[in-house]
Image (cartoon, grey):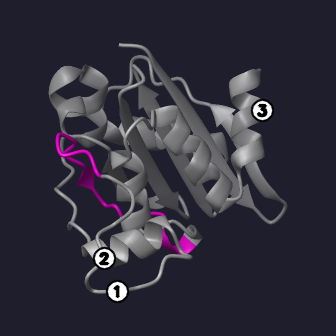
């Protein structure tokens, strides 16, 4: 299974992105150590992993501690060693209220109890983990879940959108182009 892993770290000067090699990682703590090594002094580190244009995993470390994990689909666990390594301990996230999800997906949408979300959510996706891990950076759980479930969105598209929202889009795009 092919994959791409981008570590983005934030310091006082902004974001820096580097590709992270996950080959041979023994367990989730080994992956967390590799993320810490991207910049040991960074107060915030986020790892975006995409696999086979199908699966997405996001890991977050604050101050090098408190590892939080999210995956776009639990099938990633069963279908690859990498998925099992990253997501095997992740729990199912809370499904957001449809109105909240619609507003998170489109902040300009009018809030109404009768409205369904404009963004279709894939019924076969089964996200796992902490969908709130990027909320304080401007990507609330309903928005992240909506992006992951949106028809036609590949993991690379979700990563690009999320990175634009949190402010590291140019850095990750440059990394992909390198």
- Decide if residue 40 is in sight here: no
Residue bearing the label numbered 2: 115
Q: Residue furthest bottom?
A: 112
Image x and y of residue 16, in percent: 75, 46
Q: Between disc 3 and disc 1, whose residue precedes?
A: 1
- The label on residue 174 is 3
Span shown in magenta: 121-136
Q: Position of residue 124 (x, y in %)?
A: 17, 40
Query: Is residue 97 something that shows in the picture?
Result: yes
Task: Tell me the distance, in whole angstroms, between the alpha carbons under discs 2 and 1.
Answer: 5 Å
> Residue 35 at x, y = what percent?
53, 42
Task: Report the residue marked by disc 1.
Answer: 112
Residues tagged 2 and 1 counted as in contact (Cβ below 8 A): yes
Distance between mark 3 and mark 2 Cα atoms: 39 Å
Kind of element beneath mark 2: loop
Q: Is residue 22 above or below residue 88?
A: above
Residue 159 vs residue 153: left or right?
Answer: right
- Is the C terminus in the top left, top right, bottom left or bottom right quadrant? top right
Q: Quadrant of the N terminus?
A: top left
Which residue is depicted at the point 55% across and 64% down? 63
């Amino acid at each position: 299974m092919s994959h791409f892993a981008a570590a983005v770290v934030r310091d006082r000067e902004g974001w820096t992105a580097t590709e992270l090699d996950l080959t041979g990682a023994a367990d989730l703590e080994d992956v967390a150590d590799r993320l810490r090594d991207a910049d040991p002094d960074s107060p915030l580190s986020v790892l975006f992993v995409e696999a086979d244009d199908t699966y997405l995993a996001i890991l977050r470390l604050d101050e090098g501690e408190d590892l939080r994990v999210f995956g776009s689909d639990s099938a990633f666990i069963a279908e690859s060693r990498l998925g099992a390594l990253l997501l095997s301990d992740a729990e199912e996230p809370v499904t957001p209220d449809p109105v909240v999800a619609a507003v998170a997906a489109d902040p300009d949408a009018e809030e109404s109890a009768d409205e369904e979300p404009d963004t279709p959510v894939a019924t076969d996706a089964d996200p796992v983990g902490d969908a709130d891990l990027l909320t304080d950076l401007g990507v609330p759980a309903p928005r992240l879940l909506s992006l992951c479930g949106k028809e036609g969105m590949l993991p690379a598209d979700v990563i690009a959108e999320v990175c634009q929202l949190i402010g590291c889009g140019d850095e990750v795009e440059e990394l992909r182009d390198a």
